[in-house]
Structure formats: structure tokens, C-alpha cells
Image: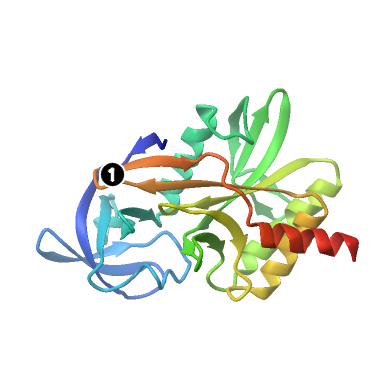
Amino acid sequence: MSTPLIRVPVRDCVFLERLNRFVAEVLVEGRVERVHITNTGRLEELLVKGRRCKVAGISGRKLRFRLVALEDRGGYAVIDTRTQSRAFEAAVERGLLCFFHGCRIAGREPRIGEGRLDYVLECNGDRVMVETKSAVLRGPSGEAMYPDCPTKRGVRHVRELVRLMKSGVRVAIVFIAAFPGARCFKPFREGDPQLYDVLTNALAIGLEVKSLGIYMDNSGIVYLEKPCLDLCKDWVSEAAERVKG
């Protein structure tokens, strides 16, 4: 049974066109509006002209809305990374994630070396450094996948997490499968072969790779559908073979 996490005040829209990495055009209440996109993925399977969508109001000087979600198989896929983060935080604080029981958010955007991660959690007296990633690409068998395009930032984050892990720090990377009915998580080799290899090698040597499944309903409520989404068996098997090799 899905658990409600947060409610986002959204308005109905119809997707028209992505203009650039950060801006799209949608039809809201009979008016064409340019809206902000927080997700830098390509999202080509979701950003389809004519698809029903949801926007939320913002106080920007040029744009009045940001694109939050698009209709997907009876619900809505949440593409907005801010909404994904709020849902993750709510799930952690309410103790709903099987892999972060007894945890609370102790800090946000901790500086690590020359960059930053997303969270510091305090879990039963231990500290965990956490990076979250948006997995809204649906595979042919319902897999949630990341990334859908090359990501130097993602590769850097995984390498930084591995470095911290080897130094004795507890770290985790969490993939937010943000569409209804996600079956499991795996990286998308065709999206970024380098990220695929780096993450597979990291899993093989013990990096905590976790995933959860969320979606939005028509009223703007974000639900936790899978509090502990499995990693896809074929990917786990490949990582295990790399250890043997």
C-alpha cells in the first residue's frame, strides 16, 4: 500500500515544448506559459507534446511556474528535483525507508572536497553522507534507470563517495524512482557508459546503493510506493562477476 508523503499545490497543464535545458512551454488554464524545469535530464520519454502535466507556482521574476510532474500510466511521474527531495526528506524523518531506520536529517549540502553532497544523516549515533539522484527513465521491463544522458557531475559524485567509503566514512547513494510501478533500479549504460562502469564497480566493492519508488496523484499528493526498491538482479549479478574477476 502506498503511503502519502507530501502534498504539492499544483495546477493542471498540458505540455507543449521544451525550449532549452531549463525552460519549457505548457498550457495552463488556457494560457501558454513558460515554466522552469529543475531536472537537467533529457526526459524525452516524458516531455511529449500534448501530455497532461502539473505545475507549481514560484516567485521568479521571469517565470511564474515550475514543471512538477507529467502523466504516466495512471499517475504522474515526478520530474521536479525539489519535490523529489522533499519527498525523500519526509520519508527519512518518518522512518519509512527500510535502509534508513532510526535516521534523521542532520544537515544539507555538506561540502566534500571541492564539491557538495546532498545530505548528512544521523542514524542511531552514526553519520551517513548521502547523495540522491533522480531516476525517472522507465526501462522496457519497468526498471527505473539513471542517467538518460552523460553526466560528469554524477561520475564525480560516485567517485567521491567511493573515496569517502575507503577512508572509513559511511556513505550511500539513493536513486529516487519517481514514476508509478517501478520494478527495480539499474543504471542506464546507453545514457552514460562511464557512469555505468563507475557505479557498477562501486557496487561491487561495497558502496551502499539504495532506491525508493514515489509517484504523484492527480491532486498533487506524492506517495511512497516502494520504501525499499530492489536493485535489478541482472545488474547486481554483473557487479558480483566483477568482484570475481
Q: Position of residue 193 (x, y in %)?
A: 67, 74
66 relative position to 233: left or right: left
Q: In which quarter of the image is residue 99?
A: top right
The residue under the point 58% across, 56% down is 185
Q: Position of residue 218 (x, y in %)?
A: 25, 47
| Residue on which disc 1 sits | 220
Q: Where is residue 35 in the image (x, y as percent from the top left)?
A: 28, 62
Mark 1 burial class by Cα count in 10 Å: few <14, some 14-19, many 20+? many
Identify which amino acid the numbered label 1 is placed on. Gly
218 relative position to 231: left or right: left
Q: In which quarter of the image is residue 64?
A: bottom left
Q: How is the image coloured?
A: rainbow
The residue under the point 63% across, 57% down is 232
Q: Quadrant of residue 244?
A: bottom right
Quick one: quadrant of the N terminus? Answer: top left
71 relative position to 183: left or right: left
Q: Position of residue 220 (x, y in %)?
A: 28, 44
The residue under the point 53% across, 39% down is 227
Of 3 and 112, the residue lying toward us? 3
The residue under the point 74% across, 65% down is 198
Quick one: quadrant of the C terminus? Answer: bottom right
